[in-house]
Structure formats: structure tokens, C-alpha cells
Image: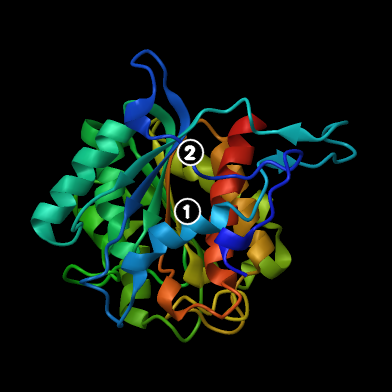
Amino acid sequence: MGTAALPNDPLWPRAGDWPSLDALPADESADLALLGVPAHRTSLSPTGAHATPAAIRAALRRYSPTLMADRGRRDDARSLADLVFADAGDVSEPDGPDGEARVRTAVAAAAARAGTVVALGGDNSLTSPVALGVWGDRRATAGLITLDAHYDLRDGVSNGSPVRRLLEAGVDGRRIVQIGIADFVNSREYADRARDAGITVVHRDELHRRPMVEVFAEALEIAGAGGGPVHVDLDVDVCDRAVAPGCPASVPGGISAFELRQAARAAGADRRVESVDLAEVDATADAPDGRTVRLAALCVLEVAAGIALR
């Protein structure tokens, strides 16, 4: 069922369709701003990830911006209506040096008017320009958390290189945490590179022994140790392929959709996190039920929920 056929119920508000960031009054800022970054031209595998920002925006309409009552946390259902949402549009042609410069400029402009910027990818190459655009001249104190099956420490410029590029841009490896690194999809050389850089690596199997909320809290302390802003990269291919078939590099045995959503909410709940990206979803290769794009849309709402629950 397409979003155009969704029923209309005045007692069941829908998420999405947020106003343009430019349309907000000059003296008003947004709690959360979306920015589409449809990077795809340097992907190591064929991808239609440039179609994903629009698909996520459409999928948001399937959901309500409402948190249900939960004994032990809150007594009543809570609407996210008190938050100010805005949409900063898409960066045109975000690949290549000129495109990445446009990304940095657009992200910086969005961050100047929003407490948290959520960048909708696009492949994982967006992580570097998005983070640098938010950090500006604060990169020496900034931190990075990735949820990803891969180290992303490859040479060159691609969706396999953003972490290496951020290291080279001056980010201290001791404030980088990589959660979900998996067997059989990395190399010993890149594992050595991560170790030598001082990166904290949380193997996918550790999440069988420790809950995501505990692991992510530790990651925040490491990434935020410099007192600067933290960027969170939610590479959806960290998830099990059963829940993320629209990610070209997802594998059977990845983390659950619930764990990714937990991480997204924890990111939104911490004021040190000024930016989040959603990467590696190819909307054109998703399952017929759109489960991967829907998961990405729910992660947007989980970030918002975290902001609301601060």
C-alpha cells in the first residue's frame, strides 16, 4: 500500500511533512532538522542510495509522532508535538570535492538553526562531510560513534573510507568508537589500522553479552571525552540482512532492528550528539514491503524521541 493510500484520521496524526527550515521565523530554531545527502557515485558496490532520502520522508508518513505509556518511565502517552521539526531539503550532487563542499556548507547552515541535524543518505561517504560540516573548527575535540559492520578505513574516497578520512582531518582515534564490527566482512589489515589509531572496537558478538544501551553509553563517554560535539553514523548494514535487505552489504547475523533503534534513541537523548547520519540504504533494492526504508524512518523518530525525553 503506497503512502498516497494511507487513511486519514484526525485523531491519529502522522509524522513527516515537516516545514522547510527556511520557513521558520528568523528567531526560531528547530529541535531536529532533516537534510538529504543522496551520495552514491563513489560506492564500492552498485547502489540506488540517491533515491533513499525521498523514500525515508515518504515512509515517515506511515508512523505517528507519539510515544506510548511505559511503566517505570512515564505514566501517559507522550506526543512529540512540542518539538520543532524542519526539513532543510537535499544537497544537490553531493559526490566529489565540489559536492562534499556543498554538503559541509549545507550541514553547517542547518546546524546553526537546529539542535540536532539528521542527514539522510545516501551511501556511507556522506559521514565525513556531514561530520566536518557540523564540527567546523571543533574537530580536534570532536568524537565519532559508528554502528557499522565495517571499519570504513579503506584508502581512497568511497563509502568504505569515511573513518580514515576523518582521522586524516584531525579527529583523535581515541575518541572514535565502532559498534557492530563483524567477522568475514573486514580484513586483518584494517583491523590493525583501527588498533593503531586507538579506535575502540565493539565486536558484533559483544552485543550478545551486553545490552545496546550499556554499550552506547560507554561509547558516548569515550567519544565525548574531548568536550566537543559527537557525530553518530547509523550505517544500517550493521543490521541482520533479514531486517535490512535494502543494504547491499548487510549480512545474516547482524544486529536487530530494535538494537539499531535503541542506539538512535540514545543518540538523540544526549546533548553532546549534534548530528546523526543514516547511511547505506538503497531504496531501489529494498524488499517489497519497504522494511529497510521503514527502519531508517523509525530511526529518525527514535532520535526525536531521545530529544523529547532528555
**Quarter of the figure with residue 191:** bottom left
With 74 as the anchor, is 249 left or right in this view?
left
Position above or below: 45 against 20: below
Tell me the tag on residue 18.
2
Q: Secondary structure at mark 2?
A: loop
Q: Is residue 217 visible?
A: no
Q: Work out whether residue 192 or residue 3 is closer to the camera in this orientation and state it.
A: 3
Task: Name the quadrant of the C terminus.
Answer: top right
**Quarter of the figure with residue 223:** top left
Q: Position of residue 306 (x, y in %)?
A: 62, 38
Q: Position of residue 153 (x, y in %)?
A: 29, 68
Q: Position of residue 273 (x, y in %)?
A: 46, 38
Q: Is residue 194 visible?
A: yes
Residue at figure coordinates x 30%, y 37% from the top left? 134
User: What's the residue type where badge 2 is placed?
Assistant: Trp
Q: Work out whether residue 253 or residue 50 is closer to the camera in this orientation and state it.
A: 50
With 244 as the anchor, is 191 left or right in this view?
left
Q: Which residue is mark 1?
A: 57
Position above or below: 230 against 197: above
Position above or below: 166 against 267: below
Mark-to-mark CA distance, 1 and 2: 9 Å
Position above or below: 109 against 122: above
User: Contact, CB < 8 Å: mark 1 with mark 2?
Assistant: no
